[in-house]
Image (spheres, rainbow, N blue to C red):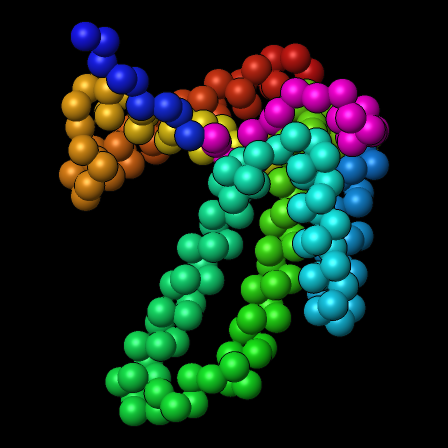
Amino acid sequence: MAVKQPQIQHSLFSYKKGNSFLHKMNPGVKIIIIPVINILICILPPQFALCLIALQTITAFFLRFTLKEQLCDLKPAIYYAFILFFTQLISAALSKTLPEFSWQAQKTTVLMLLKLFAIMQLTSIVFKTSTSLELRNGIAFIFGRKSAFTNTIFLFLNFISLISKIWEQTKKAWLIRGGKQNIKMYKALIPVLFSVGMKKAWNTARALEIRK
């Protein structure tokens, strides 16, 4: 009887092949769009962020990004929101001000999280429609190919998806070997994640240095 293999989860901000207008867009333009729209999200009323989330969700489905893939890239924001509300709830309970834990009291937090979700979603779409090489070319398009800043920014952006991919691969290997998803798994895999991640980052940096 064949053993069912655990499916690898989608890694954070991983590229997804496609032939859409966003896949074909100049990567430098996409990189410029991120800070411009992020500034608008921060300075405009929350209704702008809400409309942007709706538009970006429709765009993501149009690009054939599954709901699971979209939620994967939003996990950091979801975890942050959960931790934020949980700590506020505990704090209110301990200080005996639980009645103050109301919508009016939490309105500022909710609106801030709304803007955070819009920013994360925009970043997800850009990363999912751009390969690592396209991102590097896009950064070079803005700052110049010989700029040390170009390589620094590229390594930083590439490291985000790289770490997520390494984590999912090591986690899959752990589960295949019969390991359980518990505290013991995290204690065993986090050092591996750190070691492999640093090695891959070093190799990438050396490769870029050699190509100069």
Residue 127 position in % (x across, y down): 65, 34
From the viewer's perspective, tell me whether residue 48 is left or right of residue 72: right
**Which residue lies most toward the front here?**
1
Residue 197 position within the rendered picture, expressed as x and y whole percent measured from the top left: 41, 28
* One can see residue 95 in this view: yes
Residue shown at the point (73%, 40%) measured from the top left: 59
How many tags in the picture? 0
Tell me if residue 22 is in the magenta stretch. Answer: yes
**Dominant SS type (magenta):** loop
Residue 158 figure quarter: top right
The residue lying toward the viewer, choosing from 147 and 197, is: 197
Q: Is residue 163 left or right of residue 44?
A: left
Where residue 57 appears, as percent x and y from the top left, is 67, 46
Q: Which of the 4 image quadrants contains residue 135?
A: top right
Q: Is residue 202 above or below residue 127?
A: above
Q: Quadrant of residue 112?
A: bottom right
Query: 112 or 64, which is in the foreground?
Result: 64
Report the residue at 71% width, 65% height from top.
Answer: 42
Q: Is residue 58 magenta?
A: no
Magenta range is 10-27
For the N terminus, the image quarter is top left
Q: Quadrant of the C terminus?
A: top right
Residue 197 is at least partly visible in this image: no
Residue at left offset 29%, top offset 36%: 190
Vertical relation: 33 (above or below) 141? below
